[in-house]
Image (tube, helix red, strand yellow):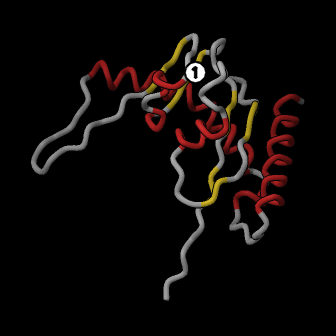
Amino acid sequence: MEKKKHVKKILILSNKKRKILYISKLYTGAKHDFSMLKTEFPTSLPWFNNFVLWLDSGFQGFNDYYETTVLHLSLRRKRAKKGQKSDLTPEQIAHNQSVGKERIYVEHSIGGMKRYRILYNRIRIKNDITLDRIINVCAGLWNFNISA
């Protein structure tokens, strides 16, 4: 019998200086990024009113639930049927590239946390509370590292 893998995901918010501003609790199983965001930040409150946000295509429909000063959202390709090509227009490709150039700082923050090998290697700890604490300590160490 095949053993199921338990996927563990977190939601990370960071700024352009690669400082980690927020880490969500640990989610086990297949969970979409946008549903994690709606769980962590209830839509009834004005969480992002004074912020400029750079989001990837996993957050389609963000405008329907939250208000923000400026939102830069990468565009998603449509699924192509057999024999069809589903390319974006050159303007849409340029837009996605500009969003990606700003979002790379978030990826650098995540990579900086993974430098602490406890997150890089396979984690065999079964207690989610302990894992949350380990992730938070790694984020704190990363923030301390970039501020020094």
x and y percent of residue 22 in the render?
Answer: 74, 34
Residue at (62% x, 52% y) in the render: 9
Q: Is residue 91 above or below residue 133?
A: above
Residue at (49% x, 29% y) in the render: 100
- Count of numbered circles in the view: 1
Is residue 78 rendered to the left or right of residue 97? left
**Does dot 1 land on a helix, a strand or a loop?**
strand
- Quarter of image, res 45: top right
x and y percent of residue 42 in the render?
Answer: 64, 32
x and y percent of residue 70 in the render?
Answer: 54, 12
In depth, the one of 22 and 62 nearer the eye is: 62
Q: Which residue is mark 1?
A: 53
Q: Is residue 110 above or below residue 88?
A: below
Q: Which quarter of the rendered picture does the C terminus lie within?
A: top right
Q: Is residue 109 above or below residue 52?
A: below
Is residue 109 rendered to the left or right of residue 144? left
Q: For mark 1, does the 10 Å Cα neighbourhood hold few (<14), some (14 to 19), or many (20 or more) residues?
A: some
Q: Extreme left residue here?
A: 83
- Quarter of image, res 4: bottom right
Residue at (42% x, 26% y) in the render: 97
Q: Amino acid at mark 1?
A: Leu
Is residue 20 rendered to the left or right of residue 28? right
Is residue 112 rendered to the left or right of residue 54? right
Residue at (70% x, 52% y) in the render: 26
x and y percent of residue 103 in the render?
Answer: 56, 29
Q: Extreme bottom residue here?
A: 1
